[in-house]
Image (spheres, rainbow, N blue to C red):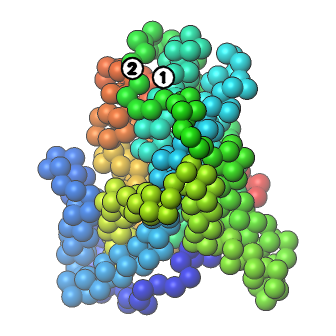
Amino acid sequence: MSLSPTLLAAAPPALPHTGSDSQLLVAVLLSIGAIVLLITKLKLHPFLALTLGSGLLAAVAGAPFDKLLNSFSTGFGSTVASVGLLIGLGAMLGKLLADSGGANIIADTVLARSGRKALPWAMALIAAVLGLPLFFEVGVVLLIPIVLLVARRGNVPLMRVGIPALAGLSVLHGLVPPHPGPVVAVDALKADLGITLALGLLIAVPTLIVAGPLFARVAERWVGPLEIPAATAPASGETAEREHTPSFGAVLATILLPVVLMLGKALADLVIDNPKAMGQRVFDFVGSPLIALLAATLLGMLTLGRAAGFDRARISDTVGKSLGPIAGIVFIVGAGGGFKQTLIDVGVGNAVSEWSGKWHISALLLGWLIAVLIRLATGSATVATITAAGIVAPLAATMSSTHAALLVLAIGAGSLFLSHVNDAGFWLVKEYFGMSVGQTLKSWSVMETVISVVAIALIMPLSLII
């Protein structure tokens, strides 16, 4: 099932291509190489890099530029129409969660019930719960003060609680909708979002256990003792100074509402399996990602905003301010959709299907490898996800809904591989934790690689039994 119920325009006819498969391969390599060069060396914004890369792809593939414009704009429009709305609603919910103190309420409640030995597991749980509605960067900013406070009060090494928190955020960011990467891949591969969400959570739990609390012990020895930096944002516990704060139950219910609605839709599709039945039609409506996130956002205005003492003007201002920072993300995702559509229309997808058949390589492994290569080159998990999904999209056309969802997860896992110096997240973690470049490579970079490898190691055998 496509993520978007409607598209802004009908899919354009395939761009005329008269060259050979080798010419298509050259076109793909040159366009991706150009995107990488523009982003990493010339520091061009990914939106512009993806747009220029699409033009180069069509030119080398022998497609006329008048057809290119229609192909790129259709891909851009359909992607923004389906994914952009979800990103906007997610940003609104995340902003309400942050400004109301709801994030700290979750953290305080869980930590109050955890002993010293359970702190790494508690931090992983907190990060996973908060990671459902929050973008990775927002989650890091919210969690770092909590991590520093826990390490200081609990007298535990910073890595022991820091790695589980980072792993919780990163795993959710790469594998679980409604985060931008998985949602874009779901849309590109026409996968079922509910099934992807269910399987994503299934893969995320053991992956988080390995890359979080278990790897934290290793990272602690590799990095050595770290001085705990002073918190740079309001820390956990300060919400007690507010006159009004949301309740733990209300915050948790608001965060989990879209997950429950989307999983309910997936379950109804399996149990009822009758598109004309009233029950399934209701679940299909309320469990669609747009309605599920819209419901959670509207509920959050009451359970988070009003409960924190915000008046209507303050709630409106909070929601409005959430949209500014995500404008760049929406344009990058849209340009990625245009590049994806160009890849498909010049025939790259069909050629990849033929090549994968000749090479006898699993589509899941192919999607993971392509995402890994682009992640290493660009440093962007979102760019890696979008590009890899566009290249392997035709392979999903003949897949079952379950295997299409697993392909989404394989690409998401590949997009997390080995964050290093060309990734903004690398520097964000380095500065917040006060580590050197070497220490960040030994901890954060290895943790990201562990997530990627463990996830694909779970996805491959799972594809053989479901």
Based on the displayed image, in which of its 4 quarters is residue 232 positioned? top left
Report whether 321 appears left or right of 464: left
Write the residue at 16% across / 46% down.
41
Location of the C terminus (image quadrant): bottom right
Q: Pointer 1: what residue?
A: 148
> Against 438, is 174 above or below?
below
Tag 1: amino acid: Leu
Q: Pointer 2: what residue?
A: 230
What SS does tag 1 mark?
helix
Report whether 291 appears left or right of 222: right
Asked whether the beta carbons under mark 2 and mark 1 sit within 8 Å of each other, the answer is yes
What SS does tag 2 mark?
loop
Based on the displayed image, in which of its 4 quarters is residue 231 positioned? top left
> Against 59, is 114 above or below?
above
Location of the N terminus (image quadrant): bottom right
> Does residue 270 appear in this view?
yes
